[in-house]
Image (tube, grey):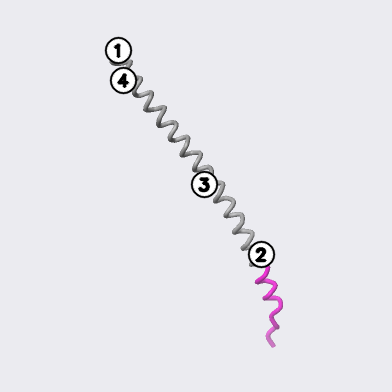
Amino acid sequence: MEKEFHDFEGKLNHFVQLFQRLRLENNELRQQLAAKTDETRRLEEKLGEARTRVEGLIKQLPEEV
């Protein structure tokens, strides 16, 4: 019985360590996702601004005769 309890305790400790490591990894991934989401939003805004400028330049081109 003592051996079974000791084995169970070892497995439980291993599970707790794994849980803590995965929780830290999950938090890091959430932060990375938030950063990438912000970066994507900024790039989409820049793309929209560039599109607007290009469209404005196209409108200024003289029409073909």
In the rendered image, residue 50, in percent from the top left (x then y), is placed at 64, 67
Q: Please tell me whether mark 4 sits on a helix, a strand or a loop.
A: helix
From the viewer's perspective, tell me whether residue 22 is left or right of residue 48.
left
Crowding at dot 3, Cα within 10 Å, few <14 / some 14-19 / many 20+, comes out as few
From the viewer's perspective, tell me whether residue 54 is left or right of residue 13.
right
Q: Callout 1, which amino acid?
A: Glu
Residue at the disc numbered 1: 2
- The verdict on residue 60 being magenta is yes
Q: Callout 4, which amino acid?
A: Asp
Task: Of the two numbered discs 2 and 1 on the same chain, state the one appearing first in sequence.
Answer: 1
Residue at the disc numbered 2: 49
Q: Tell me the distance, in whole angstroms, between the alpha carbons under discs 2 and 3.
A: 26 Å
Task: Of the two numbered discs 2 and 4 on the same chain, state the one appearing first in sequence.
Answer: 4
Q: Where's the C terminus, which quadrant? A: bottom right
Q: Which residues are magenta?
A: 52-65
Q: Tell me the distance, in whole angstroms, between the alpha carbons under discs 4 and 1.
A: 9 Å
Q: Please tell me whether mark 3 sits on a helix, a strand or a loop.
A: helix
The residue lying at 49 percent from left, 42 percent from top is: 28
Residue at the disc numbered 3: 32
